[in-house]
Image (cartoon, rainbow, N blue to C red):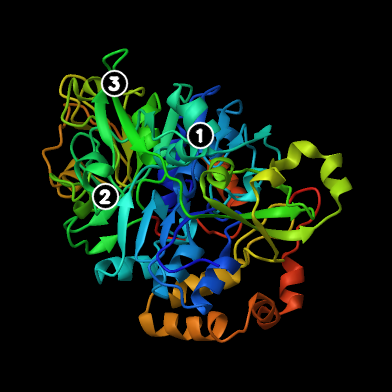
Amino acid sequence: MVPDGSGLFWGGFGFQRPPIAFASELIRQKKRNLTIYTCGSEVDLEILVGAGVVPRLEIAFVAIEALGLANNMRRRVAEGKVEIEDYSNLAMAMRFLGGALNVPFMPLRSMMGTDMVAKSRYRGDEKLKVIDCPFTGEKICLVPSIQPDFSIIHAQRVDMSGNAQIDGIVGEDLEGSRCGKKLIILAEELVDEEEIRFAPEQTKIPAMYVDHVVITPFAAHPMMCHGYYDYDLEFLQMFHKITRKEETWQEYLDTYILGVENHTAYLDKIGWSRLNKLKAIKPRGY
Amino acid sequence: MVEYSKIEFLAACASSHVRDGENVFGGTGLPLLAALLAKETHARNINLISEAGFIDARPREVPLSVADTRYYLGCSASIGLIETLGFILQAGHVDVGFLGAAQIDEYGNLNTTYIGPYESPKVRLPGSGGGNDIASSAKRLIIIMTHDKRKFVKQLDHLTSPGHLEGPGSREKWSMVGGGPEVVITDMCQMDFDPKTLKIRLMSVHPGYTVQNVLDNVMFDLIIPNDVPTTDEPTQEQIDVMHRLDPHGVYLGKGGS
């Protein structure tokens, strides 16, 4: 469904609700030349750039946070195979908000005085502009809005009409889900419409925005989904270790992504006893 | 005699700069450990905020991610990024932010993006994340780094987050909301900023280190005042609290970066 060359808003934040199952599927379908727009992402970006699916990104952050640097990204950037246009988190969130509001740019008070203004990887003059505010005369930074081809969001639950509920934090997913031309939701489970209507304040994404829904349990493994499962720390540490070398990364790619037919086969490979141990304990959420 | 590691010393020292009742941006890693330590000891009423959307957080164990559900349990509001970095931070409500960096220059400007030339980077680092936003708009900034000569440089490979930029008047020129860096804490010493020049100045040296050790490990002209005291050591209570917060040694067990 996603043609080569598309631009994608990429949902989730840090360890929370990254659409990793979707990233793996893009790799299996041998997609090429995709551009990713997000504040920050981790394992998903590592596998996308590692597999050569994504040569361009407009992001604020990539690493495995507490575990350390993003090794695949580091290698691909050093090889010149991946280009990153750097923004701050607030700048990216404002770009999505601008796209969602259907206005061409948004102002913010960050990034000024730094190399994020002075240097551009490929957008050139289109990266941002620092101007004197026409009303107050203060310096202000304008960033261009984004309306990517697709927004990819991982939610906890949806109903048949596509109403998507997100628990915990939303990161930049409210703006991100509304800025894309098509919205694809990955949901942990399908629930009755009644359940959605019973807690409508949790419907962070009303069905009217939603184009496609995929029911995908454990879509974030080895990362976490609030209220559903915790991160798989041991797997994550293994992943971070194997990405240090191209050879071991290629083995991982062959084993866990290309070597399985689909996400269900991936989960079988991880093993259900392992996955069940990650399931969240109520009410703590992890 | 309290026994402590370098990392424990660094976190304890950083935590002492948090004042009770402040709105604090925690992040992850050592900065978060320092903020949590403050909250468990002398600054119980801080409002700990994570940029992913958690407000007034009270995690029982250290989150590994700013979006970790460990931040959720016990927080009083769970919202999103425009709320924290926009409505709270950019509107001027954050008293103190913590940042680390791979490189710092004499004005406290930070690099967290590239090592090597921008055109052909040797190492891609994490990037700004919310770091630039925090450095631009938090009232005070506490910078935490492990001490290494290659990190205290005359010229950054990349300026990701603003310190005092080119000195007096620079932050005003860009209408910045926040006041910029206040202290830099390493495993060797504490540094603050000379109010006249806004350049880094030695503040205190940790036990076991000398002023000369510090001078040997910076690549710019560090301002040395006449009187350089020894930094207070952590207490046993602080060490115990840190181990309770990080039972698996995720932060305490590694060298930090």
Q: Splitting the image into 4 quarters, where does residue A21 fall? A: bottom right
Q: Which residue is the site of mark 1?
A: A101
Q: Amino acid at mark 2?
A: Arg
Q: Which residue is the site of mark 2?
A: A123
Tell me the SS state at disc 3. Answer: loop
Q: Position of residue B60 (x, y in %)?
A: 66, 45
Q: Which residue is the site of mark 3?
A: B175
**Count of marks, rendered view:** 3
Name the residue at 56% across, 33% down.
B48
Query: Dot 2, how many residues are within 10 Å of its Cα: few (below 14), some (14-19), or many (20+)?
Result: few
Q: Are marks 1 and 2 on the same chain?
A: yes
Name the residue at 50% across, 86% down.
A254
Q: Is residue B47 above or below residue A12?
A: above
* Left or right side of B153 for A185: right
* Left or right side of A17 for A31: left
Q: Marks 1 and 2, Cα distance to the nearest angstrom? A: 22 Å
Q: Chain of mark 3?
A: B
Name the residue at 53% across, 68% down.
A23
Between disc 3 and disc 2, the foreground one is: 2
* Left or right side of A197 for A82: left
